[in-house]
């Protein structure tokens, strides 16, 4: 059997067997609607309460601050649209980071169609959010500022705490929403530390199940997007996903317990690939902001000279190495990634960015296997081009 090395953990991660074990009873013999008054319902409600307490603990908030959702897409939609609508009486301006995931950006576009004015924040030469540009745009009529915490392109950590401080000083009614999908389990995400009002996360990015996530919301209100039975304190109707919520809580617990080991695994995997760079003529690492604010080692962006990333990716795939030509998918089809443009990469070079992403299950042997394949693929393609 050919070996498969999966290095696309920023896209999704395998389910941890311990997380699966935490979910299993509620996928089998146990069931009940948490809203039912009989013992099956009460037991389901208790299980859900336990999961909620676990999620709350991970972000140092109260259980009532956790809204379970179907993932980060829904959490971002609710955080952006729901909070902006709830703050409408104060104004109709919304500021959005330039590198946001489509679930944030397009949520803002939806607001635009109902009369909000949406502005995109500028990036500095380090591809980080330009806080001076932000300060200039802030005024009391800004009701929401959305900015991701860790870049899904390079792993760059954005200065959320400083951003929140600038927002508080100049826009008293504005809520700060953070997409923490690529940050949770990797860096500190306590809401008070970040100074944010709401945070979106997705379980499958941290060895939990797909289709479940949460919006963590402190001292803020949202206008619900899903209405009906009034679950989640009226903020998200629909019978709760009990097994999924338990999976999310368990995934967070293991992510926290094993954070140091996970960081070490990512660092070692990254180093194993970077060590072979001299054998890849013209290739280089993209790690904007590493010195200024740090970078999450779990994501490694490489500019490969020899061919577009998409081509290299498919050649790697044939050798059993699964990565992503990820950076480009940040932007809408045809448009260039704003973060790459900020770094001075032209449209052509931007197509040469290959993304490796690691997890706590990644071994050095896997990274070495991938590095060897990458060296060979580049040699092969160079020979074809010659
Ligand atoms: N935000 C970011 C930064 C992401 O990487 C993703 C997943 N690609 C999402 C939001 C959306 O998460 P989900 O697909 O689980 O809803």
Image: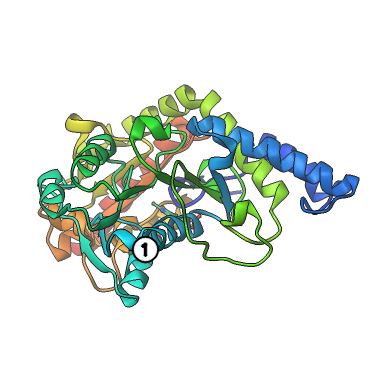
The image quarter containing residue 82 is bottom left
As drawn, 386 above or below 298: below
Q: Residue furthest bottom?
A: 113
54 and 91: which one is in front?
91
Q: Residue at x 32, y 36 (%)?
A: 273
Image side of residue 129 versus residue 200, left or right: left
236 and 100: which one is in front?
236
Image side of residue 61 versus residue 309, left or right: right
217 and 69: which one is in front?
217
Q: Which residue is mark 1?
A: 102
Q: Residue at x 21, y 60 (%)?
A: 120
Q: How many marks?
A: 1
| x and y, in percent, of residue 67 in the image | 56, 49
| x and y, in percent, of residue 342 in the image | 13, 54
As drawn, 114 above or below 226: below
* Residue 29 seen from this side: no
| x and y, in percent, of residue 277 in the image | 23, 38
Q: Residue at x 54, y 48 (%)?
A: 214
Q: Residue furthest front?
A: 89
Q: Residue at x 69, y 54 (%)?
A: 240
- How is the rendered protein coloured? rainbow
Which quadrant: the C terminus? bottom left
As drawn, 107 above or below 22: below
As drawn, 200 above or below 317: above
| x and y, in percent, of residue 365 in the image | 46, 32
- The answer as to whether callout 1 falls within 8 Å of ligand 1 is no
State the SS at label 1.
helix
Label 1: how many Cα within 10 Å (few below 14, some 14–19, many 20+) = some
Image side of residue 314 versus residue 46, left or right: left
369 and 237: which one is in front?
237
* Residue 260 seen from this side: yes
The picture quadrant for ligand 1 comes to bottom left
């Amino acid at each position: 059997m050919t070996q498969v090395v999966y290095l696309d953990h920023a896209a999704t991660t395998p389910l941890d067997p311990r997380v699966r074990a935490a979910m299993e009873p509620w996928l089998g013999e146990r069931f009940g609607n948490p809203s039912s008054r009989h013992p099956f319902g009460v037991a389901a409600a208790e299980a859900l309460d336990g999961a909620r307490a676990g999620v709350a603990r991970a972000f140092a908030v109260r259980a009532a601050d956790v809204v379970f959702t179907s993932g980060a897409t829904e959490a971002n939609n609710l955080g952006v649209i729901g909070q902006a609508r709830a703050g409408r009486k104060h104004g109709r301006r919304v500021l959005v980071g330039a590198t946001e995931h489509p679930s944030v950006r397009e949520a803002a576009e939806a607001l635009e169609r109902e009369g909000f004015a949406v502005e995109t924040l500028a990036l500095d030469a380090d591809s980080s959010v330009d806080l001076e540009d932000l300060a200039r745009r802030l005024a009391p009529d800004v009701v929401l500022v959305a900015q991701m915490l860790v870049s899904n392109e390079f792993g760059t950590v954005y200065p959320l705490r400083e951003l929140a401080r600038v927002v508080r000083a100049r826009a008293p009614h504005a809520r700060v929403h953070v997409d923490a999908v690529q940050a949770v389990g990797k860096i500190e995400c306590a809401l008070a530390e970040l100074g944010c009002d709401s945070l979106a996360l997705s379980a499958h990015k941290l060895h939990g199940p797909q289709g479940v996530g949460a919006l963590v919301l402190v001292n803020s209100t949202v206008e619900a997007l899903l209405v009906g039975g009034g679950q989640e304190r009226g903020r998200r109707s629909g019978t709760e996903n009990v097994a999924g919520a338990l999976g999310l809580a368990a995934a967070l617990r293991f992510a926290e317990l094993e954070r140091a080991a996970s960081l070490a695994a990512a660092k070692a995997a990254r180093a194993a690939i970077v060590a072979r760079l001299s054998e890849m003529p013209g290739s280089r690492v993209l790690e904007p902001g590493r010195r200024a604010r740090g970078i999450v080692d779990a994501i490694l962006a490489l500019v490969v000279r020899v061919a577009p990333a998409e081509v290299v990716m498919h050649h790697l795939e044939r050798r059993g190495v699964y990565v992503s030509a990820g950076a480009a998918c940040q932007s809408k089809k045809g448009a260039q990634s704003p973060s790459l443009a900020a770094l001075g990469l032209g449209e052509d070079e931007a197509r040469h960015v290959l993304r490796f992403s690691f997890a706590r299950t990644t071994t050095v042997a896997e990274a070495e296997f991938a590095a060897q394949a990458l060296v060979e693929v580049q040699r092969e393609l160079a020979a074809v081009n010659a």
